[in-house]
Image (tube, helix red, strand yellow):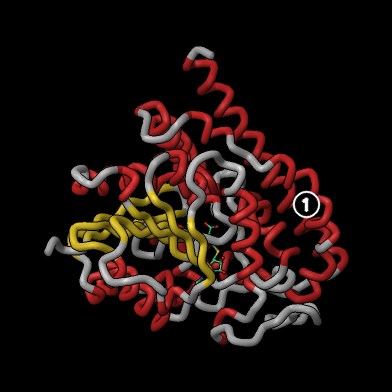
Amino acid sequence: MPDTLTKFTYQTFQQSKSIFGLAHKTLSTELMKIFSPVENKTTPLPPELIVKLQEFLNNLLETDWEDAEKGVYPKSLLFDNPWQDFFIYYPQLCMDFAQTWERAKYKKHQDFSADVDTKNYPKYYVRNYHYQTDGYLSEFSANLYDLQVEILFNGCADAMRRRILAPLKEGLKVFETVPATQQRVLDIACGTGRTLKMIRATLPQASLFGTDLSPTYLRKANQLLSEIPGELPQLLQANAEELPYLDDYFHATTCVFLFHELPATVRQRIMNEAFRVTKPGGIFIICDSIQLSDLPEFEPMLDNFHETYHEPYYRNYITDNLVERLETAGFENIEIQVHHVSKYLIARKPSA
Ligand SMILES: C[S@@+](CC[C@H](N)C(=O)[O-])C[C@H]1O[C@@H](n2cnc3c(N)ncnc32)[C@H](O)[C@@H]1O
């Protein structure tokens, strides 16, 4: 297909996802107001902020396209969408509205099905982030998760995740004498494996590893990743506060959408662990929500996020000094990038 046509198809695909996400959220909010009204203090976004958001979104998609065009990753990744999951789980997600609304209305944050085992997890973890059914601890939740995130970000969650790939590929250049098959990359809190799938497409020969606390999310990740030809990433259930790996083991470490869900002290512990397991000269890349200092004018939107979803550590996160934390862990040369509602910290472990 000629490039202009591929680009047009990509833009149309993203626009459709964006419209779908917006329509879903508008409709579910209206239904909630009728069937389960909740008093919250969200503020409507001023028109100039909406214009700015749209600009950021356009830039994100343009950068995504350019990175694929440069060959950072294959263009096929731009169209990767879990269609089968969409058709199976979208109806289930809608049928789950009533439960989610009830949790939001009565501020039930620790509401789990009887068969969910919540023992032996950190206290901060055993909760219904976003009021989602069973938190991170059931198959039902694992099946709905990707769809929920795509809707939350109006169809650009994967484009946001892909922003780690160019710095990852660049960062690994210092290890160019190491055979590609011996380069090890760890994705911390890999969830259902979407980031690992993208890393696999970018680094087809690298040894990939993923850890997460949720056994059901790891099972879902295993399903997704085992569909891809080539070496299967090694998945391990582990608390990122105590990674079960040797010191200096990974050439690169990544972590997507985790830190805003953690208490400050845990954020620091996980950065310390990322530092410990990364090789000297290696990089650690974080992708997460923007913070107040990145775009102060976005404060109403960040506040609305905190008000609407159950995100108890978010307010602290948006004012936390992540650069200082990374430096405390031992990283240096920390580069910050800001894309659509997301920020990226690219940190290097000093060479030995
Ligand atoms: C918002 S999800 C992000 C998942 C994935 N990285 C993505 O891009 O969608 C947060 C993930 O962090 C995991 N998690 C939270 N606290 C953790 C911890 N202390 N150790 C390991 N995983 C953790 C959760 O189980 C969940 O899969």
Query: At x 67% / y 72%, what residue is drawn?
Result: 137
Q: Considering the image in quadrants, where does the C terminus appear?
A: bottom left
Q: Residues within 10 Å of mark 1 (few under 14, many from 20)?
A: some
Q: Nearer the viewer, residue 231 or 282?
A: 231
| Three-letter residue code for mark 1 | Tyr
Q: Position of residue 225 (x, y in %)?
A: 57, 49
Query: At x 28% / y 71%, what residue is drawn?
Result: 247
Q: Position of residue 317 (x, y in %)?
A: 43, 72
Q: Position of residue 6 (x, y in %)?
A: 53, 20
Q: Number of callouts in the render? A: 1
Q: Considering the image in quadrants, where does the N terminus appear?
A: top right
Q: Is mark 1 within 8 Å of ligand 1?
A: no
**Could you tell whether 159 is left or right of 95 in the image?**
left
Q: Nearer the viewer, residue 121 or 266?
A: 121
Q: Residue furthest left?
A: 352
**Could you tell whether 60 is left or right of 305 in the image?**
left
Which residue carries the number 1 mark?
Answer: 89
Q: Which quadrant holds residue 191?
A: bottom right
Can residue 158 be seen at all in this image of the molecule?
A: yes
Q: Residue furthest top?
A: 2
Q: Position of residue 4 (x, y in %)?
A: 49, 16
Can residue 48 be seen at all in this image of the molecule?
A: no
Q: Nearer the viewer, residue 351 or 271?
A: 351
Q: Report helix, strand or loop for mark 1.
A: helix
Query: At x 23% / y 76%, what residue is drawn?
Result: 328
Query: At x 31% / y 43%, what residue is drawn?
Result: 180
